[in-house]
Amino acid sequence: MVYRSHVLICNGTGCTASKAPEIMTRLEKELAAKGIEKEVKIVKTGCFGLCEKGPILVIYPEGATYCHVRPDDVEEIVNEHLVKGRIVKRLLLGDKDAEDVAKSLENVGFFNRQVRVALRNCGVINPESIEEYIARDGYAALAKALTEMTPSQVIDEIKKSGLRGRGGGGFPTGLKWQFAAQEVNDIKYVCCNADEGDPGAFMDRSILEGDPHSVIEAMAIAGYAIGSNQGYIYVRAEYPIAVQRLNIAISQAKEYGLLGNNIFGTDFSFDLEIRLGAGAFVCGEETALMTSIEGKRGEPRTRPPFPAVKGLWEKPTILNNVETYANIPVILLKGADWFRSIGTEKSKGTKVFAVGGKINNTGLVEIPMGMTLREVIYDIGGGIPKGKKFKAAQTGGPSGGCIPASHIDVPIDYDNLIELGSMMGSGGLIVMDEDTCMVDIAKFFLEFTVDESCGKCPPCRIGTKRMHEILDRITSGKGEEGDIEKLEILAESIKQGALCGLGQTAPNPVLSTLRYFRDEYEAHVKEKRCPAGVCKAMLKYTIIPDKCKGCSLCSRKCPVNAISGEVKKPYVIDQSKCIKCGVCMDTCKFAAIEKK
């Protein structure tokens, strides 16, 4: 059937929470009421990336992208755009006065600096339709691998591309596949890490929600390359939409003969199963993940032997994360040289980041390796809200570190981030402004690690707990001389002694903030002062007599009656009663209250 218009509606987790399904229902009803339901096709898509502007709705062929759409906006969109052919400018993303709406979007910084490889189909196709995936060259790479290439040729192409693991470690993907292929064993396994436990990270979830077939196709290619007939996708149970769409995609692939026996008429067979994780952060570590798939408590194993030699059920196993797999089909179709042309000398291709925190355009971005942090934050991210100054960016989640403003122009790639004391990680990027306390940030990430430690090895189980206790003492105004040095000693001991990569990298947020913001630690310990005014125990709210008009509003709003005085005379705050809630400062209309 030929449609005159296609309406694409984001149905990722964020937009679903913002009533995207209700928008779709209203749209169907309005189209039917106007008698044009057979002329307009509604397409449910995954995440477009610009989460800050969701729910997003795009109408083709005009290319009009509407943002912050609400159910009550649907009637106007149908009447004006789909019936009368007039753009609803108040909802338009981009230049609202542009004559060519589609071209106006080319000037939107969020989109025009990105290079979409792993995210190529997200927001473009219906993830629950295998036909739409096939129309975008889906499963052509698998066909090419099975009918035109030998397993070793597939591995050589991946090695030549320079693709490195996007889950955090950055290990060369082709080399990992080669190690597993070289093992002589009748049973081998292909695993996908879709656990994604980093705070603020949602890259893998969005790919599974928006383009699940790309991962399925890539895992089948990996199975052919190493000689495996069985794959497992380990995905968080907290990702219900991703799990649902994965199940649909696997069923469709089996129905089309793209999973199962004798794929494309060859003697290659491959099947996939989903395993749900219970939300343990440590199960993002490869050996703990495999232990969990086996039905045991998710705890890391000692290495060597590495999984490529002895992994799942002690058989040769490869494990890559969702984003890594999403790159595989494109590399085989467009060639390793094409992929190598993107990125830097040692970090090829693109990287997907979940950008959040103190930034205007929160969302999902895919950039070529080597783009600077400044470009990501200001050109794509739209800068810091309220004109605040950029202070630091946390990359790599609890395993990563903070990059200060002084390094905002360093190109983002694996080696540069490690040199700065951080790491690529899975792709979380949390932006912090001038009002952020770096000691408090370090405590936040370490608290997460303490809660999520599996407890198997003492350096992680005990060491991180002791570090957190010191940080808690420092941020409570009880820091002592020598605490900073104790943190450094503990951090190095944990890095050297922890069993798995998660434990070894747990001290990174503390070490990186000590490296770049040591003065803040010293202010907390020696001066009992939080320079950012975040740590409550050290805060002090005072009324500036010359600015106070004596209106009594702050006194009336104070929840603990800590403010007293006479009307039309300066009021005072009783520090013994003050709970440092900040209500007085928010209430004052004369900027007469200061926080220090």
Image (cartoon, grey):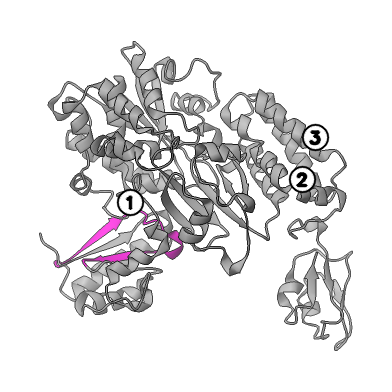
Q: Which of pointers 3 and 2 lies earlier in the amino acid sequence?
A: 2
Q: What residue is at 55 percent from the left and 26 percent from the top? A: 299
Q: Which of pointers 2 and 1 lies earlier in the amino acid sequence?
A: 1
Nearer to us: label 3 or label 2: 3
Q: Which of 184 and 327 lies nearest the eye of the viewer?
A: 327
Label 2 to label 1, Cα distance in Å?
A: 42 Å
Quadrant of residue 331 in the image? top left
| Boundaries of the magenta span | 38-61
Reading the image, the residue beneath label 1 is: 122
Percent x, y for residue 3? 14, 64
Quadrant of residue 466 in the image? top right
- Name the quarter where the C terminus is drawn: bottom right
Nearer to us: label 2 or label 1: 1
Percent x, y for residue 312? 42, 21
Percent x, y for residue 223? 30, 25
Label 1 to label 3, Cα distance in Å?
A: 47 Å
Q: Is residue 144 above or below residue 249?
A: above
Quadrant of residue 181 in the image? top left
Residue 47 among those drawn in magenta: yes
Reading the image, the residue beneath label 2 is: 472
Reading the image, the residue beneath label 3 is: 486
Percent x, y for residue 528? 85, 53
Q: Secondary structure at mark 1?
A: loop
| Amino acid marked by disc 3 | Lys
Res. 149 mark:
none
Q: Secondary structure at mark 3?
A: helix
- Name the quarter where the N terminus is drawn: bottom left
**Res. 36 visible in picture:** yes
| Amino acid marked by disc 2 | Asp
| Amino acid marked by disc 1 | Cys
